[in-house]
Amino acid sequence: MKRFFSILSALFVVVSAFAGTPNNDRIFAAINDVDSPLYYPNLMLRYKEGKPMSDDEYHHLYYGYAFQPSYKPLEVNTAMARVQEIMSRISIDKPSVHDIDELIAAGISAMEADPFSPTLLNILTYAYGASGDRVRELAYSEHLRGILRCIEQSGDGLKEKSPMHIIMFSHGLDYIASKNINALKGRIISRTVEFVPFDFPQNKVKGYYFDYSRVYWNKPDNYTFKRERTWQFNNLKPREYK
């Protein structure tokens, strides 16, 4: 069974390490300033409308989400179960119109709880492409690239002191999958950092470090968090745009 989320590495731009290491205080100030071009409600509106966005806008949008009331990373995203069910039975190469319509509806619903999920962005890119909606297909493809680039720019991920920053555990696994690398079970190595090893070293790199601290900012005292791995499906690969 192949991980459904398989992105060609050619899609991504190589960026310098730490180019976008998030500064929580600066992000909070910018997204709450009504006179700022980074005011959060405006950013989210443009994101949902599929507008083109800069790396700085993706950076504030992604990490700024941790300050929003809707950010509840420890709650189960029930709509994702519907996405999973549809993806488990859909014919990837020749999907029916009904299945694609259901998939789009379920994906949009699931994004209400996890609007920056690379998994969902990838699925919706596929679904809109299959439906013939080229405009939305390209919009979700650009959002997918932007979010993965945002994570990539937040640290090199090679050391505990230079992790990539994520707002959901699954986003780190999706990032690794986007490199066509299979991840093994992650290991929590500190109160804020997880190490996710690869099944085989890549250019002597054995895995990536991810800062997951935002996930536990508002953790209830009596909450026990059980993480799920990212879902896997056969033969779904996003289109490559040139």
Image (cartoon, grey):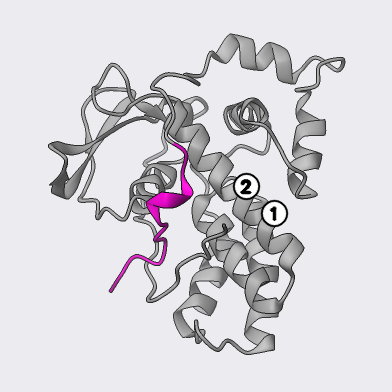
Tell me the tag on residue 49: none
Q: Position of residue 140 (x, y in %)?
A: 65, 55
Magenta region includes residue 62: no
Q: Position of residue 116 (x, y in %)?
A: 58, 45
Give me the C-alpha separation between circle 1 and circle 2. 6 Å
| Residue under numbered circle 2 | 143
Instruction: Write the residue at 42% across / 19% down.
Output: 18
| Residue under numbered circle 1 | 139
Whether residues under marks 1 and 2 lie with C-beta atoms below 8 angstroms apart, the answer is yes
Q: Is residue 19 above or below residue 167?
A: above
Q: Looking at the figure, which quarter contains the N terminus?
A: bottom left
Q: Position of residue 119 (x, y in %)?
A: 49, 57
- The span shown in magenta is 1-13
For badge 2, the amino acid type reads: His
Residue 152 picture quarter: top left
Instruction: Write the residue at 36% across / 54% down.
Output: 228
